[in-house]
Amino acid sequence: MLEQIKTIRHAPDEEYYVSGHRTCAGCGPALVYRLVAKAAGPNTIFLGPTGCMYVANTSYGCGPFAVPWLHTQITNAGGVASGVEAAYKAMMRKGKYTGERPHVIVMAGDGGATDIGLQALSGMLYRGHDVLFICYDNESYANTGIQTSPTTPWGAVTTFTPSGPAIPEGKRLWPKDNAQLVAHGHPELKYLATASLAFPLDLMNKVRKGLNAEGPAYLHIQAPCPKGWQFDSDKTIDMAKLAVDTGMFQLYEYENGKYTITYTPRKRKPVEEYIKLQGRFSHLKPEHIEKIQQFVDAKLKAIEVEVTAVSEAAPTD
Amino acid sequence: MGKKRLITGVVATAEAVRLADVDVISSFPIRPYTGIMSELARMIADGELDAEFVHAEGEHAQLSVVYGASAAGARTFTGSSGVGVTYAMEVYSPISGERLPVQMAIADRTLDPPGDFGSEHTDAEVCRDQGWIQGWAATPQEALDLTLLYYRIGEDPRVLLPQYACQDGYFVSHIAGEVDVPDEAQVKEFLPPYKNKHQLNIYEPQIIGAQIEPDMGPPLQYQRALAMRNAKEVIKEAYDDYNRIFGRNYSPFVEEYMTEDADVVIFLQGAHSQTAIDVARRLRNHGEKVGVVRLRTFRPFPTEEVRDALSKFKVIGVVDNSANFGIAGGGGVLLTEARTALYGEGDKVKTVGFVAGLGGEAITRDEFYRMFAKLKDIAKTGKVEQNAYWVPFEL
């Protein structure tokens, strides 16, 4: 069992995601990877489907992983993880492997988790494989040069959803909520949570809960992308914090059929404060932003976060 | 010593998987290979086999599961037929590229449309250049033997390549034949445990499948090509040991039937060879100088052995049990590859193609008689008027 970490100062010093990669400055997914590896420790096998965390991490001869890592196709991380887990189960039962049973963790981007890799994820959860499947969500196909994915927000510009006179708002679809999608149709699922880069202690403890669960677990982690979202590379953590404080991203756990909201902003900020800092939304008009605000309000109401959005400038008695 | 049983190809294959002490199996239903998985499921339920049986959500997932399991150090088995084989296409090259010796049984089947269940080599031949060892069993006995042989060949450190152990759908998979099922001690002597030094192991962390720069890819592909080349020597050794331990009499690459003093021969692979041999025997009874050459190993293609075998004859009819639209020569893959093997032999060896048995139709004796008659015509006139004939539409 991996113990819960009491404070950030109690986090282990050891790193298992080390130097030797070439991600962009301020890369959210790379920072997520570091925290996940730190929380998981040495007894870990990582599976890396195609995506930023494959291409930018494993340039030949300089991979940053101090634990075993295997590439998978962008399509099939859930299937490969199922195979690794089943292999260790069989080999241990048959006496062909006598070491410690490794934790198996998938680190998939939003494409590999919510889009082309969704079928493999669902199969793995349905069958009950003891794997922690993590989606580091940077809200686009970023490695290929920022194309829309199912988690790209409404109104965001990508190279496949440009804004122009005929389509002023850019992307016209509301994002897929993968955590909600997988939570309710997989009876073998033992633990599910969302996490944010701005809450590292919470993130690491959720990783540990997912690994301690005897069966499949799913973690959806928002991981801001300076290149794709178009903000300065020293603002990654601020952006992650604002996403949670505006309700654009919500933090919760789902265990034994019950939801627990793990963080509620005392004063919820309007989404505009988040949107105005990102180049991908710079074309949006006030009525577009209002639409996003309504979407977020409705969503929070659905998960019972009754916090009204209050502008910084407004009185806050 | 082994036990004689009257069983189908799918049951014979499952018996071999049990004997190989496979650790992880991934399944998805599609006819006709499904029977292998039903039999394995029964063995696990009855306590005859200790393996993880993963119900994959499709063929692509089946191959993904064995990719992961093999990388973790397990001996693995999967299989499919028809469009199931092609649905998994993305994963074949990563499996051979990471040098994971997984085994896949293919009980072959036509591709869609129109949802024909029948046997055809098309599905398996589509995958022929993905870096997998490949060949066809022509009887249930050969289906069992091929499974054991391929684990030994594929897992050899000089090879480390996955294998497609193919059998003709229905003709082999679902028609019972007498099968000598070996005992476990014999199999232990033949097949050592699977050990791959490139393994997902927390005590020796390795990065497997790293992304590389364009100039770093070709050396890896060259290594895969060399592994295919090395496989020929390993295949010979494995067949020698197999014949000795199990009392068989297989030739590893090419088998000849009634070819001494033959003028014309049929060249083919798989179960239809049995009918061809039967027809050749009948023609021999009437004094005709005909024979059959059967290809046993399709990948690596035994170019020299095929050349040596075929260059002795005047005319060779190459039977392709697959649909290859627009292919050079208008026949099938075997025709183009036999001609490549014969390159340099000049005009003294004439070749002609027959596309036959599509959609699972049996290639009848009558059709083989017509093919042999065409070969004798060519031998007499010295003229090949048409590169290839679609049977029965054109012959």
Image (cartoon, rainbow, N blue to C red):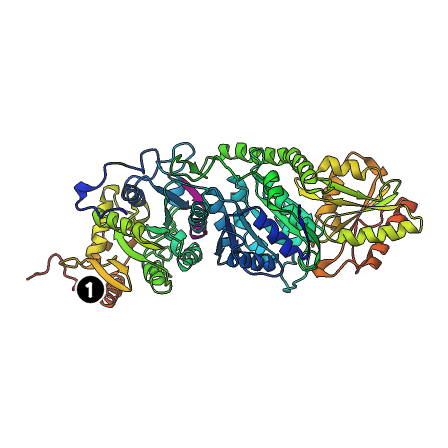
Is residue A57 magenta-colored? no
Residue B295 pos. (x, y %): 73, 44
Residue that mark 1 sits on: A305
Write the residue at 10% across / 60% down. Answer: A314
What quarter of the picture does the N terminus of chain B occupy? top right
Residue A231 pos. (x, y %): 26, 46
Q: In this view, does A126 lie to the left or right of A34?
A: right
Q: Quadrant of residue B119?
A: bottom right
Residue B68 pos. (x, y %): 46, 46
SS category of the residue bearing label 1 = loop
Furthest toward the left, the residue is: A317
Of B234 and B57, nearer the camera is B234
Write the residue at 51% across / 53% down. Answer: B26
Q: In which quarter of the image is residue B8?
A: bottom right
Amino acid type at image mark 1: Val
Is residue A79 magenta-colored? yes
Magenta stretch? A69-81
Furthest toward the front, the residue is: B1
Q: Residues within 10 Å of mark 1 (few under 14, many from 20)?
A: some
Residue A64 pos. (x, y %): 35, 36
Q: In this view, does A172 lie above or below A130?
A: below
Chain for mark 1?
A
